[in-house]
């Protein structure tokens, strides 16, 4: 009997959790119902507690007491959604790994359709949202604009309207783990890997409880990470802007000479001010763009681990440990 379990392929479901106590029970029940229909697969659910402060961790421990298929990774503090996903993927040992948010905006039932595609031989199956219920107009609009902007300026093909809800095959996961850059834009990294990728459309539902953990400040940071990690176009834009303003300045110089030759007296104060402010503004923008990239370079050369795990709970492999007891080189996230 045990043998047949050993031979089954395994699905890992990775769930980033940040202050989600209101949704965890409902989430668990829905996911459990879905996985029980997967007769040909065994499964594990890898929850990554991203420094929650609302008792989510205790709730997860209670769930894990009842269900040996649950693994928990507890971060030492909040490291952010993208890093939490990465830690989950690093620690998942399934033949396929699915990433899903805890708030049930991405319906777990869609995973069965992901699996069908995976069984057909696809390495990455991502969910494409065809509606975004319960999200503000502003969020929908900014998201739509961002995805389209990104698509036009970067070279690799990141699909439009796709979040992090996706399935990855074992080999996609193995290569994903090699990508350790600090400012992470996971969906871009997964596209970058290549192999056979396909989308499955689904309806994005409303968050089942609680509030979004992505305020606008975090969203802007995320959008910047997406653009700067996959494109140097903004840097080129700065140069073009420089050329353009110098060109305008030369034109204006011509007109100044003509005015002088024709003997007009120059009143000039307003013009000088406007020109100065305009050029000053452009210089600051360009400096800012350069700064964004330099900031990322300095982040990268510090070579810090991506995250710090305070505790791992893994009943199946009999692990209940503190990674800090082990040598640094073997720490997860290294
Ligand atoms: N999340 C996280 N760390 C964070 C922010 C969010 O692990 O710093 C998790 C959160 O618990 C949820 C998922 O990431 O499972 C997506 O967050 P949310 O639903 O708040 O984002 P939205 O869907 O509103 O963009
Ligand atoms: Mg959400």
Image (cartoon, rainbow, N blue to C red):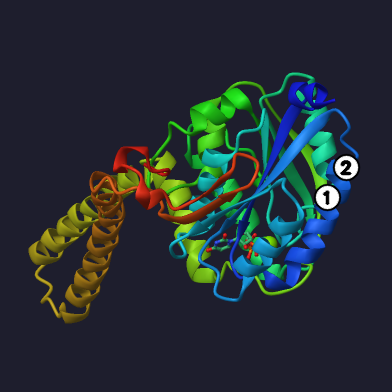
For the C terminus, which image quadrant? top left
Q: How many angstroms separate mark 1 from mark 2 (CA)?
A: 6 Å
Viewer-closest of 302 and 1: 1
Q: Is 143 left, or right, of 40 in this rendering?
A: left
Residue on which disc 2 sits: 36
Query: Horizontal and vertical percent for residue 49?
Result: 56, 60
For the N terminus, which image quadrant? top right
Query: Horizontal and vertical percent for residue 264?
Result: 13, 73
Element at badge 2?
helix
Q: State the residue at coordinates (55%, 69%).
A: 52
Q: Is 228 left, or right, of 253 in this rendering?
A: right
Task: Please give the label number shown on residue 32.
Answer: 1
Task: Please give the label number shown on residue 306.
Answer: none
Q: State the residue at coordinates (61%, 34%).
A: 93
Q: Is 131 left, or right, of 47 in this rendering?
A: right
- Residue 307 higher or lower than 215, as above or below: above
State whether label 1 is within 8 Å of ligand 1: no
- Residue 208 higher or lower than 14, as above or below: below
Q: Is 179 left, or right, of 169 in this rendering?
A: left
Q: State the residue at coordinates (56%, 48%).
A: 85
The answer to whether residue 294 is seen in the rendering is yes
Query: Horizontal and vertical percent for residue 68?
Result: 72, 47
| Number of other residues with Cα within 10 Å of mark 2, as a class: few under 14, some 14 to 19, many 20 or more | few
Q: Are marks 1 and 2 in contact (CB under 8 Å)?
A: yes
Query: Horizontal and vertical percent for residue 91?
Result: 54, 41
Ligand 2 image-quadrant field: bottom right
């Amino acid at each position: 009997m045990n043998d047949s379990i050993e031979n089954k392929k395994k699905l890992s479901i990775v769930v980033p959790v940040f202050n989600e106590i209101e949704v965890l029970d409902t989430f668990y029940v829905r996911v459990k119902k879905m996985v029980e229909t997967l007769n040909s697969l065994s499964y594990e659910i890898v929850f990554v507690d991203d420094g929650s402060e609302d008792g989510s961790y205790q709730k997860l421990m209670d769930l894990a007491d009842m269900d040996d298929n649950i693994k928990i990774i507890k971060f030492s503090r909040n490291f952010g959604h993208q890093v939490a996903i990465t830690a989950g993927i690093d620690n998942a040992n399934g033949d396929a790994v699915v990433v899903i948010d805890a708030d049930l905006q991405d319906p777990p039932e869609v995973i069965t359709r992901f699996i069908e595609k995976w069984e057909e031989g696809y390495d990455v199956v991502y969910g494409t949202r065809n509606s975004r219920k319960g999200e503000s107009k502003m969020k929908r609009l900014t998201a739509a604009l961002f995805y389209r902007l990104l698509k036009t300026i970067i070279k690799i093909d990141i699909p439009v309207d796709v979040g992090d809800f996706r399935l990855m095959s074992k080999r996609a996961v193995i290569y994903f783990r090699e990508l350790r850059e600090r400012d992470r834009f996971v969906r871009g990294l997964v596209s970058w890997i290549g192999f056979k990728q396909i989308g499955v459309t689904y309806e994005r539902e409303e968050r089942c409880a609680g509030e979004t953990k992505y305020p606008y400040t975090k969203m802007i940071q995320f959008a910047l990470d997406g653009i700067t990690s996959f494109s140097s176009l903004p840097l080129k834009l700065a140069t073009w802007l420089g050329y353009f303003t110098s060109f305008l300045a030369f034109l204006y110089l011509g007109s100044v000479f003509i005015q002088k030759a024709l003997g007009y007296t120059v009143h000039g104060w307003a013009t000088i001010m406007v020109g100065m402010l305009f050029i000053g503004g452009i210089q600051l923008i360009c400096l800012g763009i350069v700064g964004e990239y330099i900031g990322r370079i300095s982040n990268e050369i510090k070579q810090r681990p991506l995250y710090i795990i305070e505790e791992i709970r893994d009943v199946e492999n009999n692990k209940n440990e503190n990674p800090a007891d082990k040598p640094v080189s073997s720490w997860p996230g290294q």
